Image (cartoon, rainbow, N blue to C red):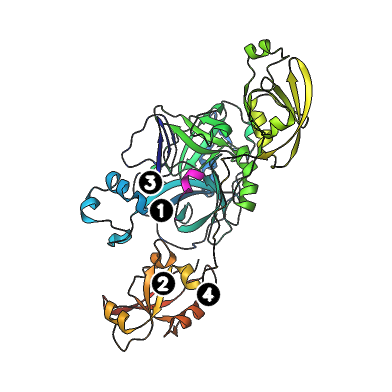
């Protein structure tokens, strides 16, 4: 994950040994190695009771032990890997491994001449039995490979991004494996009260499935993490301990309902953690699932809350409403006739108490929607109709594959050629050996994970002998997504043959 400092604010991954003051996102990079989790593809997950019941009170305190048992089965540790691009190589050498400056980059498993990779870690939780899970955008942004660790089985499963929303720092991923998985119910963060007990569960500092408890310290915090998120920041503050790696994990109430997504910490203080309200996530999840991105209505005004001074100066009857400081020229509000000094008091008949409510109401509407705005101007009430446009600068395209569909060999991450005099000489392949030689293996692909290498010769697939690329591709096309492929491979360097079993993506 990349590091993007902003004065005392640090967004994204935090490097080993880094000690930054100010606000930092609570996850993204593993401070320690990923741990000793067993590698498995689709180990079964035990069905746990859906968290719903109120935790019983023991000695004046909620029964946190029972609550933790119910919640833990739904929480996942998220591990990401991304390949360092050539443009980043100099910074990688300078900041990560000084030895590589002299001896050259080493890729996974110490292989020379392979691009180095970065590891990241965060948290998440299931919201459906089919493997949909919520995490933070900054946890998975830029990741070339995502795996998750389950609580019950200790197995790692692959996952892919379904959709991301940088503006709210919410991402939706799909975990690939045998379910059903155990979802957590989503609560109502609007009903949350300061002082309520809450529990955070996640993967702080790669200590997976760590449980901490505390109370809601405050609501509606705006931290100014970035220009992209500033309009939508509405954080829940908690003193339940949150650390790097907790990002994306759930903050739950004593009924086991998710009321927030742990996102940021204040490294200059103690027990100052912040979570995105679950109601914000509930607004964006449907669009992330359907479109992979979020589009929002845009009014084109710069607003602030109405203060007592503003109320007096502009002849307003109360401090309710959103005060218009500036109208964007040519924007929807400008075209509708709004002007600076207006106070917007209602949207489509729904009262607006402050600027936060106006942003939420407008952003929840689709571009092209017509909205009725109640406005107070010079002490008089007026009505305007505006047609919303799409909010600029916050929409990212869905991460979808482009170009021609890949054949099965390419999806596996392999480049292959028919054996020739040149390839036999280059890789020291015996003259009497028949098969297909591997000339390329994509970094972090299924073939790479299985241990296939350039120069290997595939002689059989699923017990069927192959003598040409066409035969190999024809056999691979019969393999369904998620199935293991049995490849019998001759390795010239070792002068031996072995079975390797990559899983078809």
Visible residue check, residue 428: no
Q: Which residue is mark 3?
A: 30
In this view, the residue farthest toward the front is 330
For the record, the magenta segment spans 137-144
Of the numbered discs in the image, which one, if any, rests on residue 415?
2
Residue contact between numbered discs 4 and 3, judged by CB atoms under 8 Å: no
- Nearer-the-camera pick, 500 or 256: 500
CA gap, disc 1 and disc 3: 13 Å
> Which percent across, then down, holds residue 148?
47, 53
Q: Which residue is mark 4?
A: 479
Disc 4 element: loop
In this view, the residue farthest toward the left is 102
| Left or right: 299, with 489 as reference point | right
> Which percent across, then down, holds residue 397?
57, 50
**First in sequence: mark 4 vs mark 3:** 3
The relative height of residue 437 versus residue 434 in the rendered view (above or below) is above
CA gap, disc 4 and disc 3: 35 Å
**First in sequence: mark 1 vs mark 4:** 1
Residue contact between numbered discs 1 and 4, judged by CB atoms under 8 Å: no
């Amino acid at each position: 994950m990349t590091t993007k400092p902003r004065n005392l604010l640090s967004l994204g991954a935090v490097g080993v040994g880094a000690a930054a003051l100010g606000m930092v996102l609570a996850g993204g990079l593993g401070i320690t190695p990923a741990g000793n989790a067993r590698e498995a593809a689709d180990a079964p997950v035990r069905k746990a009771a859906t968290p719903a019941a109120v935790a019983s009170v023991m000695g004046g305190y909620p029964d946190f032990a029972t609550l933790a048992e119910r919640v833990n089965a739904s929480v996942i540790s998220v591990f990401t890997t991304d390949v360092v691009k050539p443009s980043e190589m100099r910074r990688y050498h300078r900041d990560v491994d000084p030895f590589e400056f002299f001896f050259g980059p080493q890729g996974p498993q110490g292989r020379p001449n392979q691009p180095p990779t970065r590891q990241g870690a965060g948290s998440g939780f299931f919201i459906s039995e089919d493997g949909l899970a919520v995490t933070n955008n900054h946890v998975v942004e830029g990741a070339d490979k995502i795996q998750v660790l389950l609580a019950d089985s200790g197995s790692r499963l692959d996952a892919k991004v379904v959709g991301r929303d940088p503006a709210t720092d919410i991402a939706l991923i799909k975990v690939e494996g045998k379910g059903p998985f155990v979802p957590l119910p989503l609560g109502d963060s609007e009903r949350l009260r300061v002082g309520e007990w809450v529990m955070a569960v996640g993967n702080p500092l790669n200590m997976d499935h760590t449980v901490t408890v505390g109370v809601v310290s405050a609501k509606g915090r705006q931290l100014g993490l970035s220009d992209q998120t500033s309009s939508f920041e509405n954080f829940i503050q908690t003193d339940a301990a949150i650390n790097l790696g907790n990002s994306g994990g759930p903050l739950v109430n004593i009924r086991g309902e998710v009321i927030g997504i742990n996102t940021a910490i204040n490294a200059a203080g103690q027990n100052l953690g912040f979570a995105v309200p679950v109601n914000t996530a509930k607004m964006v999840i449907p669009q992330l699932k359907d479109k992979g991105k979020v589009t929002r209505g845009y009014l084109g005004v710069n607003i602030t809350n109405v203060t007592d001074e503003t109320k007096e100066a502009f002849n307003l009857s109360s401090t309710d409403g959103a005060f218009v400081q500036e109208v964007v020229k040519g924007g929807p509000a400008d075209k509708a006739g709004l002007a600076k000094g207006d106070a917007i008091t209602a949207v489509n008949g729904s009262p607006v108490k402050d600027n936060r409510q106006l942003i939420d109401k407008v952003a929840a509407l689709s571009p092209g929607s017509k909205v009725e705005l109640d406005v107070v101007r010079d002490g008089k009430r007026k009505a305007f109709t505006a047609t919303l446009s799409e909010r600029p600068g916050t929409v990212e395209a869905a991460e979808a594959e482009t170009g021609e569909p890949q054949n099965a060999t390419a999806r596996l991450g392999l480049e292959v050629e028919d054996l020739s005099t040149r390839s036999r000489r280059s890789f020291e392949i015996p003259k009497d050996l028949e098969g297909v030689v591997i000339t390329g293996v994509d970094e972090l692909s299924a073939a790479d994970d299985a241990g296939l290498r350039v120069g290997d010769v595939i002689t059989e697939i699923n017990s069927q002998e192959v003598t040409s690329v066409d035969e190999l591709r024809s056999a691979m096309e019969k393999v369904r997504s998620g199935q293991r492929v049995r490849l019998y491979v001759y390795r010239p360097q070792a002068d031996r043959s072995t079975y390797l079993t990559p899983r078809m993506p």
